[in-house]
Image (cartoon, grey):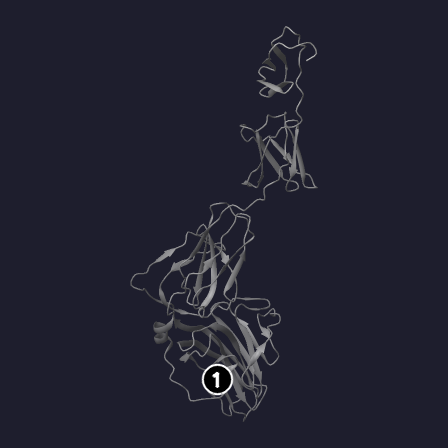
Amino acid sequence: MTKSKMKKIVSSALVANLVIGSVITALPTQGAAVENTPVGTNAENKIVSNLKATQNILKNTSFASTSTGITDWNAEQNAYSVSPPSLISFGTKGSDGWFNFGRTSIRPLGDGSVELHGTANSVVGVSQTINTIPGQTYTISYNYNTTRFTTKAALIGTATYTGFIVSTSGVVFKSGSYPSGGNAGSRAGTSLVGGSGTITDTFVATGKQTKVFIGGNLNSADKTNELFQTISNVQVLGTSSTQLDAPTLQPVKNKDSKITGSLNGSIDTLQEVQIYKNDVYVGTATVSGRNFEMTVSPSNVGDVYKAYAVDIWNVKSNPATQTVTASIVAPPTINAVTTDDTTVKGTGIPGKRVYYKVGSADWYEYDYATVAADGTYVFYINPQQVGTQISVKHTVDGVDSALATTTVTQGTVEAPTISGVTTDDTTVKGTGINGATVTVTIGSQNYTATVSGGAYSVTIPKQAVGT
């Protein structure tokens, strides 16, 4: 990091009045509404807003950390003459709260500040990559406080600095370096207190993603000299330009294990895609290019999903909406049935029930057969008349399949009986199938009658013996 002239440092109080917080300017016809979401859970309150906003784009400005890092932030350092600094692994936090990298170390305080430690000549700091709009101007600001630096050897000059580096794709396009403790000159001691103040500057983004590094360094001919500097109230402010287009959400079935969709229009400022179910925030989708998806639990028919494209200023698009519909259940099959049959057979989904109805009967919970492991089912019926309709369906998790039907056809026809006929008779009588037509043939002449009550009677002329 090169040293430059010290730029005008505006007092903390004045800068706080100018840049701290989010400045919201409402568009003429837009408003804001709070989603109906629980408080104090993962489904935190989210604001549906079509507002134009100036906001801090940086995440985790409290510097909340875990035992293995600072969420959303990277650690960077250089050694001696190496410039600019490069990423290093956080490793594991020590019991004293410091992440130690040898000649440098970082201690997140979780209160909006992070403490930096380095030995001469080295640079140590934190960086974060943010989404930006090429050509747009952003304001970077932070507070610094050089709480202690040392000049352990006499006659060895030592100077401390604070600064930032802004880059895209590894190319630095803006940087600033500011004295932060004065020149110790030939003073030797172990407890020299440096300066404090607020740094504020602007940069014009050159790409869709910009890395912002903020850190401190100490220059000294004595490499054992040390620097302790606290960085706080870190901000990168930018103003949203246009609201993102509403995404597209694909239809959702009640048995679906994930929901999917795609993004529309420019997504240069996209931060995330938020998913809501019945107006309750459920999480963020995974975005890949212009597509997104999210794993969900089975839903109820009638549930409503909404997807919002959210930009880096936390301004939401209008929602894409889908109402959950029933999943499709494949219908069973049914074999042909005749008047002779007392069983009905077919195929279906193994282990699932096949419900059935015969003729004008209703659907009943107890009229079902369970499909065997080989995919077949069977149920029993009384012999049915020709033309009777038999219907079957699957009902799986409350979802009905389409119906499969068959109409009863004539089976084996039982022969009628015929009583004895004498030369005196003018009728031929016997028994048969109700409703069937009986044909009596004498020579080449046919006589017919319909069976009623199980009997028939056909009128004929008297016949000669032996006819």
**Pointer 1: residues within 10 angstroms few (<14), some, or many (20+)?**
many
Q: Quadrant of residue 447?
A: top right
Work out whether residue 384 can be spotted: yes
Residue shown at 57%/20% (left/top)?
A: 435
Q: Quadrant of residue 78?
A: bottom right
- Residue lying furthest bottom in this view? 155
Q: Is residue 309 above or below residue 225?
A: above
Residue 45: % across, % down = 43, 56
Residue 54: % across, % down = 37, 69
Q: Secondary structure at mark 1?
A: strand
Residue 439: % across, % down = 61, 20
**Which residue bears the numbered disc 1?**
161
The amino acid sitting under disc 1 is Tyr
Q: Is residue 44 above or below residue 131?
A: above
Quarter holding the C terminus is top right
Nearer to me, 32 or 371: 371
* Left or right for 440, reference 284: right
Nearer to me, 277 or 62: 277
Nearer to me, 340 or 300: 340
Work out whether residue 190 can be spotted: no
Residue 319: % across, % down = 42, 57
Q: Quadrant of residue 10?
A: bottom left
Q: Is residue 5 above or below residue 116?
A: below
- Residue lying furthest top in this view? 424
Residue shown at 36%/75% (left/top)?
A: 15
